Amino acid sequence: MKPQNKFSTGRHQEQAAAAEQTAANSGALEFQSAEELLRHDAAQTVVPPEIARRLSKSIAESAPPRRPWWRKLLD
Amino acid sequence: MNQACAEAQSSTAAESHLLPAELGALYDAHSRAIYYLALRFLGDAQKAEDATHDVFLKALRNMHQFRGEASARTWLYRIAINHCKNVRSAWHDRHVLPSSDNEFIERLPGGESPLRILETKELGDRIQRALDGLPAEYRLLLLLVSDQELSYQEAGALTGQSADAVRGKLFRARKAFAGIFAKTE
C-alpha cells in the first residue's frame, strides 16, 4: 500500500520512494496507522455465508404459528 | 478491489436473498462491518458468527425502534457493542487482570512508527494478538474509527464520550497498538 505523507518534500520523497521500492521488492506492506491496517484486515475478512442461512432459519422458527382458518368460526 | 474482497461481497449478496427484504438490505450493507467488529473484539470466529447472527436478529425484532436519528450503521454498532460486551463479560473478564491505562502506557515502547509487515497468512493472528493486548476501551475505539463511515463524533456517542476525548484516547491507542504489534513478529 502506498504510504501517505502530505508533508513529504525533496529528500523525504526520495526516502519514501526508496522505502516503497524496498517494500514492493520484499512483498511487504506498510501502513501509516493502526486504523489503516485494520481497514486492510476488514477488507480481507469474509463474512461466513452460514450466518445468513442461520438468520433465515431463526426468523422462520420465531414467526408466530399460522392460525387455522376454522378458528375464526369458533371465535 | 482484490479477489478475496470481491468474492466476500458476492457471497454476502448471494446469501442475503434468504432474508426478509427489510433485513436483507441492512445485511448487505452492514454485515461485514458488524462481523469484523465482533471478530476482532471477541477474538473468536465462532463467537463472532453467533454474535452477528444475534445482532441482526435483534435488529429485525427492534426495527420499529429505529427512528432514523442515527445512521443504520451506528444503530447496528450500538446493538453489536452491547451484545459483544455481554459475551466478553461472561468469560473474558474472569481470566484477564485489568490494568489502568497509565500503567499500561508506561510499559510500552515510545514513538509511533509506520507498521511495516510482510504479507503473510498470519497477519490476522498478529492483529488479533495486538488488539487483545490493548485495554478493551482502546480496542473498541480503534475498531470503530477504522470504519470510514463512522465519524469521531459517532464513535464518541457509541462509547459515551466526546469527539475530543476520542481523539485523545486514539493517540494513546495507536501508540499502544504499534508497540504491541511490533512485538508479535
Image: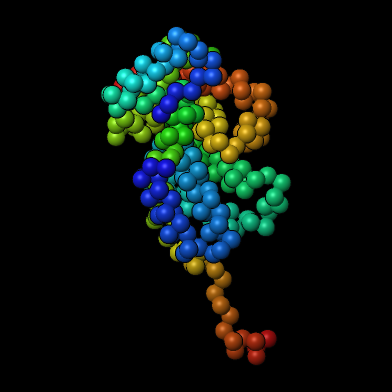
Image: A30 above or below B61? above
- Residue extending furthest front? A10
Image quarter in which the C terminus of chain B is found: top left
Q: Determine whether B47 is above or below A17 in the image.
A: below
User: Image quarter for residue B45?
Assistant: top left
Taking depth in this image into account, of B108 and A35 the one nearest to the observer is: A35
Return the residue nearer the eye: A70 or A22: A22
Check the image and report above or below for B2 versus A54. above
Residue B172, given in percent of the width and then of the height, sits at 53, 18
Q: Residue at x 49, y 49 (%)?
A: B31
User: Residue B70's x, y, as percent?
Assistant: 68, 44
Q: Residue at image x 36%, y 26%?
A: A29
Q: Does residue B39 appear in this view?
A: no
Horizontal placement of B169 versus B109: left or right? right
Identify the image quadrant of residue B160. top right
Residue B165 visible in rendering: yes
Residue at 68 percent of width and 54 percent of height: B65
Q: Position of residue A22 (x, y in %)?
A: 32, 19
**Residue at image coords 54%, 68%:** A63
The structure's colour scheme is: rainbow
